[in-house]
Amino acid sequence: MVTIEDVSGAASIAALRTGKVRPGRGRRICALISGAGPDGLA
């Protein structure tokens, strides 16, 4: 899996990849990767 996201949008993917969030067996999930981009950091 390859993802490209900004800092604020990476949290959902990080939670899934590290096992902090474990979807139930047979469940489908969608990780919304969105954020304010660099302008949101100012």
Image (cartoon, rainbow, N blue to C red):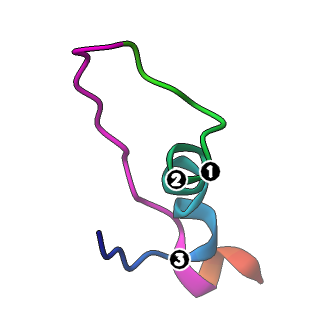
**Residue at point 52%, 61% (across, down):** 9
x and y percentages locating residue 28 in the rendered image? 22, 25
Quadrant holding the C terminus: bottom right
Q: Amino acid at mark 2?
A: Arg
Circle 3: residue type: Asp
**Label 3 crowd (10 A; few <14 / some 14-19 / many >=20):** some
Whole-percent x, y for residue 16 in the image: 51, 44
Circle 2 — which element? helix
Q: Is residue 26 magenta?
A: yes
The residue identified by callout 2 is: 17
Q: Which residues are magenta?
A: 25-38
Estimate how packed mark 2 is, as few (under 14), some (14 to 19) or many (20 or more) residues with alpha carbons within 10 Å: few
- The answer for how far apart the CA atoms under marks 1 and 3 are is 18 Å
Task: Return the residue at label 3.
Answer: 6
Farthest residue in the front direction?
Answer: 25
Secondary element at image label 1: helix
Horizontal and vertical percent for residue 29?
29, 30
Q: Residue beneath label 1, please?
A: 18
Left or right: residue 38 compared with residue 34: right
Quadrant for the N terminus in the image: bottom left
Q: Nearer the viewer, residue 7 or 2?
A: 2
Image point 53% across, 77% down: which residue? 6
Of helix, strand and loop, which mostly describes the magenta segment? loop
Q: Tell me whether the residue at label 1 lies in contact with that at label 2, contact meaning CB atoms closer than 8 angstroms.
A: yes
